[in-house]
Image (cartoon, rainbow, N blue to C red):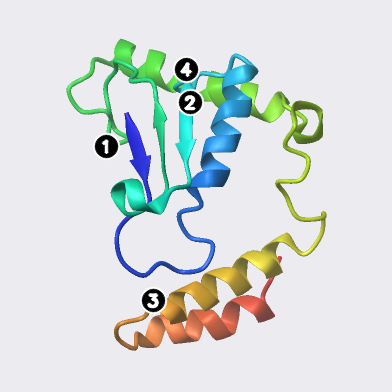
Amino acid sequence: MLRKKPPGKLLRGAHAIDREYHIQKVLYGQNYPVPEPIHYCTQVDVIGTEFYIMKFVEGRIFTDQSLPGLSPEERELVYEQMASCLAKLHKFNPADIGLGDYSKAKGNYYARGIKTWSKNFKLAETETIKDMEYLIEWLPKNIP
C-alpha cells in the first residue's frame, strides 16, 4: 500500500509523512496493530513527492461511527477493540520506545495548538467566515 503527500502547495508541516512513517515503524516494532512499514522514499523524482510503502492489511473501513449495518453485538466488539487499542497506545512512554523527540516540552499545549490551528486556517482561508474570525480571537483569551 502506498502513502504519499497530496499534490499541490501544502502548509508547512502538513502531511509530514516522514514523521508518520517513523512513528508507524516504531509502533509496529512494539507489536502495536499498525501495518508493517516497508520503505520510505525521499526521492521526489520517482512519483512527484515523497512516499512510503506499507504492507496491505485486510479489513473493513468504517466511515460512520454509529456503525450502521452491524448488530449491537458486533458494534460492542468494535468499540471494545477501539478502546483496547487506545489503552495500549497510551501505555507507551514515548521516550522508552524511541519517540522521545516527537513532542514539545510540557506546558502551553492549548496555546500552541490554538496558535498553529489559527495560523493554518488563515493560510488556507478562501473566504472570510465571521464566526471563525471570532473564534480565532476568542480562543487565546479563553484557554482552560
Q: CA distance from mark 4 to mark 2?
A: 22 Å
Disc 2 packing (10 Å; few <14; some 14–19; many ≥20): many
Q: Quick one: SS at disc 3?
A: helix
Q: Mark 2 is on which residue type?
A: Pro
Q: Which mark is residue 50?
A: none
Marks 2 and 1, the one that precedes in the sequence? 2
Q: Position of residue 126 (x, y in %)?
A: 30, 82
Q: Which mark is residue 124?
A: 3
Disc 3 packing (10 Å; few <14; some 14–19; many ≥20): few
- From the image, tell me which residue sits under label 2: 37
Dot in front, 4 or 3: 3
* Nearer to me, 112 or 140: 112
Residue occupying image coordinates x 62% and y 74%:
115
Q: CA distance from mark 1 to mark 3?
A: 25 Å
Q: Are marks 4 and 3 in contact (CB under 8 Å)?
A: no
* Nearer to me, 109 or 144: 109
Horizontal side of 113 relative to 10 (left or right) equals right
Disc 1 packing (10 Å; few <14; some 14–19; many ≥20): few
Marks 4 and 3, the one that precedes in the sequence? 4
In the picture, the quarter occupied by the C terminus is bottom right
Q: Mark 1 is on which residue type?
A: Thr
Dot in front, 2 or 1: 2
